[in-house]
Image (spheres, rainbow, N blue to C red):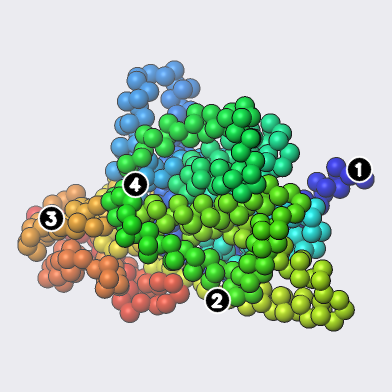
């Protein structure tokens, strides 16, 4: 078999093995049996992906019909109508590429829960394969494969490809971009610069963390003392690619996501808390042993230098850049923002292990391997399950007995509202039912929920609103955690209890949050309009 064919066959084997491992982690996490409530954003990613998919289908029908009417008006009317039915669309707040990738998958294979998670499984396997290919030449097949397996087995990483979230695609593109840039520093080939521009553009159009590449690239040049590369047209060609492809969207939507920020603008008060937070979370993600090996690898590859110096400098620069970027942008402190740097961190962990192993002889080397394997195994804990449920059975019941033009109102927190909307949208011919969120229909607040103000001052006003004939179904989740409970939750509970003749309970389901059964079930009511 020719060398090229053997390389492709090896890559295929690694991809399939990584896919199987990722699928196993997803299954143990409960991804295929749980609902879309693992993170407050998960349901929004599902509904936004469905919106883009259906918009592409409608656009095709519009074009096939002869482009009748203004395309701008057509697009706006479709978007407005879709949001009215499923008010959980985050396009603009979030960049579009993750949803285009979802659409490219769901258009031929169908939009299903299992299909979405198989897509995430494939993205995780591609990330593992990329890390394997980066490490194989220098460290050999066995060590590269083991490191790739560790990558998709770390709790932080596997948790977020166990949910419909953008982190895995973001990590794949960001890591791919920095590898291309490192190769450009080492080889000075134009194609590497072009790949960097393309992948960096895609990363920025997937998640804001991609903007950290704007800091990582110059840091890599500085660390390698290759500032002369700034004179290369290929490098500025990459900058032009990013500007043309990612610039317009980023500029046009620069203010849309601020409603979800922890603070209205960057500030030292946020940074001084976020910087140690992210350093600490990276250490927790790697665990004690991988963390120590990481420090050894940093010393070996950055301080002492070595082969492919540009690639290693780029990997180290990415780690620094992402931590700095996430410590400046006040989007909130969450460990998931570090997932794009985990592959780079594991590169240094493997370099540290290899350095120590080469200086060991006989039993000390065997002992080192045993200790490292034990440490890696320990880093895979804890084993958590997604375990979010309670809304799909009620969505199924409502869909089975109602008309497509019926209106329902869901009273829960951001997770419950989103999970119910996502399940309705996923299991009906869209757009069908109109789902109202109590947090928006009965109150006013920002995207993040701050500035909360109830819209109805008395229970009687709320009763009149609920029974005016427009809303036919009401979903009440009284298991909302106390930290997320708002005044309208208690208002609805009182109104339902005071008027049992108008609110007939037709179904209830056990509520589960993060694998814990809640004391109060979620209930579905059918509303009788006032006479």
Q: Which residue corresponds to the image point at 48% horizontal and 22% vertical from the top-left?
A: 64
Q: Mark 1 — residue?
A: 2
**Callout 1: few (<14), some (14-19), or many (20+) C-alpha neighbours within 10 Å?**
few
Tell me which numbered mark, 4 or 1, is placed earlier along the sequence.
1
Q: Mark 3 — residue?
A: 455
Toward the viewer: 251 or 153? 251
Q: Secondary structure at mark 3?
A: loop
Tell me which numbered mark, 3 or 4, is placed earlier along the sequence.
4
Q: Is residue 398 left or right of residue 52?
A: left
Q: Which mark is residue 382?
A: 2
Q: Mark 4 — residue?
A: 257
Toward the viewer: 297 or 336? 297
Q: Which residue corresponds to the image point at 85% horizontal and 42% vertical from the top-left?
A: 4
Q: Is residue 97 left or right of residue 263?
A: right
Q: Which residue corresponds to the image point at 61% horizontal and 70% vertical from the top-left?
A: 291
Question: Is residue 242 depicted above or below 495 in this figure?
Answer: above
| Residue 320 shows in the view | yes
Tell me which numbered mark, 1 or 2, is placed earlier along the sequence.
1
Instruction: Give the label, 3 or 4, closer to the camera.
Output: 4
Q: Secondary structure at mark 1?
A: loop
Distance CA(mark 3)–CA(mark 1)? 71 Å
- Contact between labelled residues 4 and 3, with CB atoms less than 8 Å apart: no
Tell me which numbered mark, 3 or 1, is placed earlier along the sequence.
1
Q: Residue furthest right?
A: 1
Q: Is residue 407 left or right of residue 272?
A: left
**Callout 4: few (<14), some (14-19), or many (20+) C-alpha neighbours within 10 Å?**
some
Q: Quadrant of the N terminus?
A: top right
Distance CA(mark 4)–CA(mark 2)? 32 Å
- Contact between labelled residues 2 and 3, with CB atoms less than 8 Å apart: no
């Amino acid at each position: 078999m020719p060398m090229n064919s053997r390389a492709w066959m090896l890559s295929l084997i690694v991809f399939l093995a990584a896919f199987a491992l990722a699928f196993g982690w997803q299954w143990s996490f409960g991804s295929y049996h749980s609902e879309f409530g693992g993170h407050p954003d998960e349901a929004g990613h599902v509904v936004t992906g469905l919106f883009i998919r259906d918009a592409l289908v409608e656009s095709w029908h519009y074009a096939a019909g002869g482009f009748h009417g203004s395309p701008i008006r057509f697009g706006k009317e479709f978007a407005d109508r879709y949001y009215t039915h499923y008010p959980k669309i985050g396009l603009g707040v979030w960049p579009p590429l993750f949803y285009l990738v979802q659409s490219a998958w769901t258009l031929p294979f169908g939009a299903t829960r299992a299909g979405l998670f198989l897509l995430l499984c494939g993205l995780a396997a591609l990330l593992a394969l990329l890390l394997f290919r980066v490490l194989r030449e220098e460290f050999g097949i066995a060590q590269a494969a083991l490191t790739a397996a560790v990558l998709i087995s770390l709790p932080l990483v596997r948790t977020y490809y166990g949910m419909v979230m953008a982190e895995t695609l973001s990590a794949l593109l960001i890591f791919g971009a920095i590898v291309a840039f490192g190769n450009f520093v080492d080889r000075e080939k134009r194609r590497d610069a072009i790949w960097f521009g393309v992948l960096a553009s895609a990363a920025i159009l997937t998640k804001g963390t991609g903007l950290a590449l704007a800091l990582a690239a110059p840091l890599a040049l500085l660390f390698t003392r290759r500032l002369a590369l700034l004179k290369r047209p290929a490098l500025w060609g990459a900058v032009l690619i990013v500007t043309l492809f990612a610039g317009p969207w980023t500029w046009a939507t620069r203010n849309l996501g601020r409603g979800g920020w922890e603070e209205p603008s960057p500030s030292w008060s946020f940074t001084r808390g976020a910087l140690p937070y992210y350093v600490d979370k990276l250490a927790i993600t790697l665990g004690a042993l991988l963390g120590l090996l990481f420090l050894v690898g940093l010393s070996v590859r950055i301080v002492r230098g070595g082969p492919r110096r540009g690639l290693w400098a780029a990997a180290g620069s990415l780690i620094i850049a992402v931590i700095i970027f996430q410590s400046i942008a006040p989007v909130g402190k969450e460990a998931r923002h570090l997932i794009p740097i985990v592959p780079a961190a594991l590169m240094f962990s493997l370099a540290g292990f290899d350095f120590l192993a080469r200086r060991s002889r006989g039993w000390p080397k065997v002992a080192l391997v045993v200790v490292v394997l034990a440490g890696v195994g320990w880093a895979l804990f804890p084993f958590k399950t997604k375990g979010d449920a309670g809304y799909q059975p009620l969505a199924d019941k409502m869909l089975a007995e109602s008309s497509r033009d019926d209106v329902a109102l869901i009273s829960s927190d951001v997770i419950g509202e989103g999970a119910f909307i996502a399940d309705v949208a996923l299991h009906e011919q869209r757009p069908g039912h109109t789902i109202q969120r109590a947090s928006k229909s009965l109150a006013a607040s920002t995207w993040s929920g701050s500035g909360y103000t109830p819209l109805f001052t008395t229970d009687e006003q709320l009763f009149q609103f609920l029974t005016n004939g427009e809303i036919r179904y009401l979903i009440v989740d009284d298991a909302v955690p106390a930290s997320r409970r708002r005044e309208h939750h208690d208002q609805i509970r009182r109104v339902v209890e005071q008027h049992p003749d108008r609110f007939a309970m037709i179904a209830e389901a056990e509520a589960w949050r993060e694998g814990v059964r809640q004391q109060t079930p979620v209930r579905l009511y059918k509303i009788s309009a006032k006479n």
